[in-house]
Each structure stands twice: as C-alpha cells, then as structure tokens.
Image (tube, helix red, strand yellow):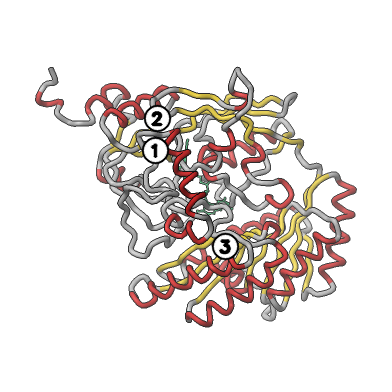
Amino acid sequence: MTAWWHKDPLHPLIKTLGKDKVFTTAENLALYGIDATTFSGDPLAVVLAESTEDIQAAIDFARENELSITPRGAGSGLSGGSVPISGGIVLSCERMKIIESVDSKTKTAIVQPGVVTEKFQREVARYKLFYPPDPSSYKISTIGGNVAENAGGLRCFKYGVTSHYVLGIEYVNSEGEVEQTGILSSKLSNPDITSLLIGSEGTLGVFSRIALRLIQIPEKTVTLTALFLKSEVGLESIDEIINLGLTPSVMEYIDRKSLTAAANHIGVSFPDQAGVMLLIEVDGKKDEVIDTLHQIEAKLKKNALVVEVAEDSEDRDRLWNLRRAISPSLVRLATGKIQEDIAVPRGKLAEMSVHLSEISLKRGVEIAVYGHAGDGNLHVVILYSVYNQGEIKTAKLAAQDVYEAAISLGGTITGEHGVGCAKRDYLHLQLSDLNIQLAYQIKKNIDPHELFNPGKIFPSKGSWKSSSSHTSHSNL
Ligand SMILES: Cc1cc2nc3c(=O)[nH]c(=O)nc-3n(C[C@H](O)[C@H](O)[C@H](O)COP(=O)(O)OP(=O)(O)OC[C@H]3O[C@@H](n4cnc5c(N)ncnc54)[C@H](O)[C@@H]3O)c2cc1C
C-alpha cells in the first residue's frame, strides 16, 4: 500500500530513476517547455535520462499512466519539435553524451544521442576523420536532435544532410523495448527502418545510440566571399559555378538586410553598394582546391563588385562569425520574427527572390533572406512587432504567401527545420491527404499508444501557447 505522503503521481518514476533525474520545479518546467521558437508547453515533469534503461523507465511510466513523451536534445529546434504538450513528460537526452567509439579503420562511430555536434566533429578530427553535417547550431545541437530532424547545414551541397551519415539507430519503442537498426542490429537485413526513424521528429521512439559514417578529413579548405549589387545576379552566379561542374562545400547566400544586421552586430563594415553576399568554401585535395578556387574567382569576378579570398584562419573565422551572427542579429531588429525555411529547386532561386520582394511590398513587411543557396534552401525571416496585432496577422499572411510561392516553384515549406507544430497546419499545402494519412498510419502502427510527441507533424491532441504561431525569438 502506498503511504499517504507518497500520493505524488510521479513518485514511482522518482523512486525508479532517483530525484536527480526527475524535475518538477516551475523553473525547470518552464525551461524545458520551450525550444528556439516561441511555442511553449507546460510539462508535468522533465526526465534527464543518463542511460537506455532510464529512457525505458520513463517510457514505461508514461505508457502506464497515459502520459505523453516528448524527446529532447538541446532544444535548438526551429519548428517546435521538442516543445511538450501540456501535462506530458519531457525526456531529455542531454546527459547521454558519451562518444562510445570512433573506428578509423571502418570510418564509423557510435555515440549516445546527447553528444553535441561540434564536440563530435572535434573528436573525430583527432583521428583525421570528418563528420560533415553542420547545422549552424552545431555548437549546441545534439546528434540525437540532428538525426530526428534530419538536420541540414552549411556543407549540404557537397556532403549531403544527416541522413547520409546514419548507419544505424538504437531506439526505445512505446512498449519500452530496445530495438536496433542498421549496423547496430545483429540481424542486418531489409527492410531496414533506419531511414524511417531519421527525420521522425521524436514521433516514433527515443534514440538511445546512433552509429555514424565518417569520411576522410579534407586536406585543405579555402573560404571566399563575393559581393553583388543585386540578389538575382548573386543567385545566378551560384548556378553558373555549378554548371562549370564544380562542387564547393559551402554556398551561402546573405541578402543586404541580413548582412547589415550581422555586420553591425560584430562591428565590421562592407561596401555601401553591396546588395548581397555569397560565402563560398571549397575543400578537398590541395591541388584540386586551388584549381577550383581559381575557376570560381574568375567566374564571380565577371559580375561581382568585390571578390575576396580569406588569407588565413583568422580571416576565415571572421567570415564565419559574420555568417553565424545573422540569426542573433536579426532578432534585435524587431520584437517578433517568423523564421521560414523554404527550399526550391536551385535553378529557381532567382525567381523565388523576386517573389519574396513582391511579398514584402504587397504585405508591407520587412523580410530578410539568407541560407544554404547551394541546396536551394532559403531562411526567410519576416519581421514584425509582437505588440501590434495587425502586424502579427500580416506577418502570418506573408508566411503563407512564402509557402505558396515555394510550392508553386516545385519547392517545399521546410528545407531542414522540420514540421513540428510550426508547420503541421500547412503540411496539406504540400502533401496530399492520402500521403499525410499514410504517414500517420505508419506512426500509429509503430506507436499505437500515441505516446511520442503528440501534435507534431500530424494534427492530434496537444496544446501549446504561442502569441504569434511559429515565431522565433532565438538568441542563439
Ligand atoms: C541559430 C540556429 C541555427 C540553426 N541552423 C540550422 C541549420 O543550419 N540546419 C538545420 O537543419 N537546423 C538548424 N537549426 C535547427 C536545430 O538546431 C536543428 O533542428 C537541430 O537538429 C536540433 O537539435 P537539438 O539537439 O537542439 O534537438 P531539439 O530541438 O531538442 O529536438 C528536435 C527534435 O528532435 C527530437 N529528438 C531530440 N532528441 C531525440 C532523441 N534522442 N530521440 C528521438 N527524437 C529526438 C525532438 O523530439 C524534436 O522533435 C538551427 C537552430 C538555431 C537556433
């Protein structure tokens, strides 16, 4: 019989895991009720798992008590993926940060889900190996979160996204059982559901170990920038470089508004006439890099105002600081920003840029644009005041215009940030009801109790608060 002082419904969970792994104070619930968007939820408890067994215990408790589980990494998501529904359990893997093995012979590694992306990159570099996926949030995001979002990043054009590097996943299912896929399974066979789990946004299970593919570290890397008068010219230059048969590792596009904000933020200046900047990086074998660099420089110089190559690592760091300052500096321009993440076929980038200027004019909203142009992935930031209901409404309408423009060009409403709760109500713009239903049936088969991350991707039970829908005030 349970004593009266053990009437706390969480008591069995605390008894199993210990009170240093289960948190219920108002501060902790608030902290783990948000991510890098302005969505928020009120969880019942936060569990900081330290092992696969801890994950199992939390899942068993949730299932038996009909509570939901929202898996969480670093909470840097930009689609509300790790924001819990009210009354659910946040299951954070941030303490599971052991790099179990790095094998230079097979070029593979096995990690726990809470390993921070940058830390992993640094660790494998000690073996002269390279883990290319590099979301701009790499200093804080976790491998578990990257896999669950199939994160992209700056080097996608040459190296692909996270899914290209995942060789197997260990996860805990809704029955609390540990399952392994890919090379983590002793029974390597088809069908391999690894690819189903990648990008599942915490809706199918909780990853407890991840096997990753590594490649040889590039011999040399050079970074260059080109400033152009007009966006369209800059964007067309990207196509021209690719049409030469060249494959830079990074091809970033930064419009004037983003450039001005970032430059002011870090205290650098750039020529007044510049309307857009391309940040390009080339890596590989030394001779190839030099040759590619010369070809790119020659091509850019035809239309650019200025083309400059970073002379040394200090210059390179300065350029990367500028690029990484964009998101935090745009936050300072307005009290609210809707951060969209559309992608279009690369050849349509210039056309998309014209659409964006038209939307800005038509709706009377300020729009800043930057992103991984090599992939056709643009981050479209719509600025507004959170204190002005009219501006909030207009910003949302502009966001819908942006989705529709991207789709009309054969693109997508989410290039890399995922659907979460931010875009689930717009998914129908892109996918047929049949396809959404099909995906939902798969989810229900794998998670019959609908334990994992309800309300994400698919409309279902859930309640979040967001003054202005999918807005982000990220200061990261
Ligand atoms: C400044 C900034 C720059 C960014 N740049 C990029 C970029 O260039 N490219 C890009 O793709 N994204 C980018 N992002 C978005 C974000 O960083 C990525 O989506 C990242 O992968 C999230 O990792 P996380 O550890 O923070 O995960 P969280 O935000 O905690 O969670 C993200 C999703 O993963 C699920 N999840 C987390 N851990 C697990 C687990 N162990 N098992 C199952 N599911 C899990 C969660 O339920 C949630 O749905 C950026 C974000 C910021 C704030």
Instruction: Give the CA distance from mark 1 to mark 3.
Output: 28 Å
Which residue ends up furthest to the left in the rendered image?
A: 4
Q: Pinpoint residue 328: horizontal percent, then vertical percent.
A: 51, 61
Disc 2 target residue: 174
Instruction: Give the CA distance from mark 2 to mark 1.
Output: 8 Å
Q: What residue type is labelled 2?
A: Ser
Instruction: Give the CA distance from mark 2 to mark 3.
Output: 35 Å
Q: Are marks 2 and 1 in contact (CB under 8 Å)?
A: yes
Snapshot quadrant of residue 237: bottom right
Q: What residue type is labelled 1?
A: Phe
What residue appears at the point 75 percent right and 38 percent down from the top-left corner?
A: 217
Disc 3 target residue: 379
Looking at the image, is mark 1 or mark 3 nearer the viewer?
1
Element type where label 1 sits in the image: loop
Foreground residue among 95 and 173? 173
What residue appears at the point 26 percent right and 42 percent down from the top-left corner?
A: 87
Snapshot quadrant of residue 57: top left
**Mark 3 crowdedness (10 Å alpha carbons): few <14, some 14-19, many ≥20:** many
Element type where label 2 sits in the image: loop
Disc 1 target residue: 452
Snapshot quadrant of residue 130: top right
Foreground residue among 287 and 442? 442
